[in-house]
Image (cartoon, rainbow, N blue to C red):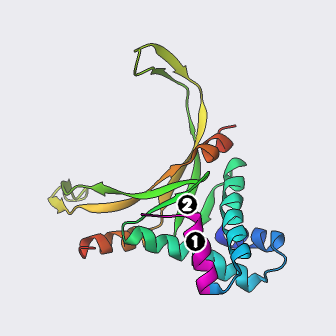
Amino acid sequence: MTKSELIQSLVASQPQLDQRDVELAVKGLLERMCRALQVGERIEVRGFGSFCLHHRPARLGRNPKTGASVQVPERHVPHFKPGKELRERVDQ
Amino acid sequence: MALTKADLAEALFQELGLNKREAKDFVELFFEKIGEALGQGDTVKLSGFGNFDIRRKGRRPGRNPKTGEAVPIAERRVVTFRASHKLKERVDSHARSGG
């Protein structure tokens, strides 16, 4: 399912909202979620799961082409932990 | 503090002018639709945010960490999330700028 398919599916079940509203709402939700993660804030959605950042410490990496070692700086990466309900739903 | 469904509904109310009831229902339905697709084994691709994939994990022998007893872990399906490059960049550039 892509974003536009999700939008279509929401339009079908929310007849009081027109397509434009649904598009803006979906984009608004995703943007709000990105912004939370960007400032290091967790996202907790009961039944669905939670998003947080995981820290990756700085390390010495290698350029696989040349073999030269390069310092890889520390970074934060988004992480998703599915909630109980979603885990069970997917694993049935 | 964590961002919750209530905060997301509030954002739809403030920024898009959905009424509170519509905003709350919309947020519920948004996650419900994603969960439904994943429940059917479908991948969910949200450009600019990330992809939710279903992965099959093979059966493996496990252990009860408390008792040390061997317990088989059956084959199962799990959801994984891969953040988009855009989201990774946003998260990382902010972290590096000291925020």
Residue A88 percent coordinates (x, y): 64, 40
Q: What amino acid does circle 1 point to?
A: Leu
Secondary structure that dominates the magenta span: helix
For the residues labelled 1 and 2, the Cα–Cα distance comes to 20 Å
Query: Residue at left 25%, top 58%?
Result: A65
Residue A77 percent coordinates (x, y): 37, 60
Label 2 marks a residue whose chain is B
Residue A1 visible (yes or no): no
Q: Could you say whether the residue bearing mark 1 is in a helix, strand or loop?
A: helix
Q: What amino acid does circle 2 point to?
A: Asn
Say whether residue A53 is magenta: no
**B98 or B15, which is in the foreground?**
B15
Label 2 Cα neighbours within 10 Å, binned few <14 / some 14-19 / many ≥20: some
Q: Which residues are magenta?
A: B1-15
Say whether residue B6 is magenta: yes
Determine if marks 1 and 2 fall on one subunit.
yes
Locate residue B15: give its quadrant: bottom right
Residue A84 visible (yes or no): yes
Which of the two marks, 1 or 2, is nearer to us in this view? Answer: 1
* Circles 1 and 2: CB atoms closer than 8 Å: no
Locate residue B5: give its quadrant: bottom right
Q: Could you say whether the residue bearing mark 2 is in a helix, strand or loop?
A: strand
